Image (cartoon, helix red, strand yellow):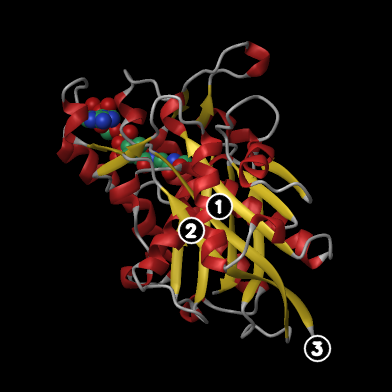
Amino acid sequence: MSTTRATVIGVGHYLPDRVVENAEFEKTLDTTDEWIRSRSGIERRHFAAEGQPTSDLATRAAQAALADAGLEAGDIDAIIVATSTADLTFPSAATMVQASLGMTRGFAFDVQAVCAGFVFALTNANALILSGQAKRVLVIGAETFSRIMDWTDRSTCVLFGDGAGALVLEAQEGTGEASDRGILSTDLNSDGRHRDLLYVDGGVSTQSTGYLRMQGNAVFRHAVEKLAATATTALDKAGLAASDIDWVVPHQANIRIIQGTAKKLGLSMDRVVVTVQDHGNTSAASIPLALSVGKARGQIKPGDLVVTEAIGGGLAWGAVVLRW
Ligand code: UT7
């Protein structure tokens, strides 16, 4: 039976020029390169330039993905930006990207599910394509978490970075089998009872921007269990098993979470794309960044079964199973 599939036809990313090594934090905080590496796996991260907003990072990643797809902005029907650090309260970062790309048709909107944002955005893009409302969707994850760091809080400010990644999805016909290219299944979850574990203590109605606050240890405990569970649920929905996976492309928050989740899924680390050492935690940007880097490294190839999974503030978490 013929089935429409939202299929990846382009991928790209952008990282700001400024690279900050762990050692830089030793100058201002009671921390060490050794602590940051051993507890998180992070070695360096990129920070946006002063005055460089999230929509600029998003636009550059989008341009790279469009070039990879051999398309122009006018070929796109919709743009979704996953971000918690949009330039302004409104309009959306997505409409800013739309204008920067010179796209005057279609529609654009943001999705906010913090570090799980890209998985939520991909699921929305998939729904738009399967329902026939869009043929080609640009899905972007872009963040400037450096803007919401409390630089005196060593337990958070050493962990995050800035960046953006993007995919172009296109409606293509499949057979309805798990051998099809494209998104095969998705699984989304949230549980607002855990909102105090990871949040920003400011926002529009408090008339402040606020800073990121995290009970890292508690988030860590939720992460491994929930990530393995959502990946397994998404695989079940596609009629697949963990042993079918070619690449897990996880949210890049902490190498120990990535290793723990792979172990729970029964996978060795040589099937996991890891970029956390170079990017830190870039929230909603981390998965598309890792997809783009994974392809550039020659890891992810056409036909590979890819599972993405992420968890973040809310808590919100989910997974997407797709064939590249
Ligand atoms: O992306 C959204 C989801 N977020 C995550 O997935 C993050 C999840 N959490 C984590 O990745 C880890 O919990 C952290 C990397 C944040 C922390 O690692 P941990 O092994 O859970 O450490 P901890 O929070 O239990 O802290 C251990 C110790 C504490 O000292 P005491 O209380 O044992 O004396 C901290 O004060 O490490 C101390 N510490 C630091 N020491 C040096 C915290 N931050 C630092 C630091 N440098 N930067």
Structural distance between the alpha carbons of marks 3 and 2: 32 Å
Q: Amino acid at mark 2?
A: Gly
User: In the picture shown, does residue 322 fall above or below 285?
Assistant: below
Pick out the residue farthest to the right.
Answer: 132
Residue at left 44%, top 71%?
Answer: 247
Which of 154/78 is in front? 78
Figure quadrant of residue 48? top left
Give the amino acid at mark 3: Met
Q: Position of residue 297 (x, y in %)?
A: 34, 68
Q: Are marks 1 and 2 in contact (CB under 8 Å)?
A: yes
Q: Against 28, is 72 above or below?
A: below
Q: Which residue is mark 3?
A: 1
The picture quadrant for ligand 1 comes to top left
Residue beneath the point at 46% across and 62% down: 291
Q: Nearer the viewer, mark 1 or mark 3?
A: 1
Q: Are marks 1 and 3 in contact (CB under 8 Å)?
A: no
Q: Horizontal and vertical percent for residue 252?
A: 40, 51
Q: Give whichever of 275, 40 is nearer the camera.
A: 275
Image depth: mark 3 or mark 2 in front: 2
Q: Tell me where residue 315 sits by quadrant.
A: top right
In the image, taking residue 257 as reference, residue 229 lies left or right, namely: right
Task: For mark 2, give the secondary structure.
Answer: strand
Position of residue 103 measured from the top left corner of the image (x, y, whole percent) = 70, 48
What label does residue 62 carry, if any? 1
Query: Residue drawn 20% across and 20% down?
Result: 28
Q: Nearer the viewer, residue 66 or 29?
A: 66
What residue does disc 2 label?
A: 12
Which element is circle 1 on? helix
Dot 1 amino acid type: Ala
Judged left or right of residue 308, residue 136 is right
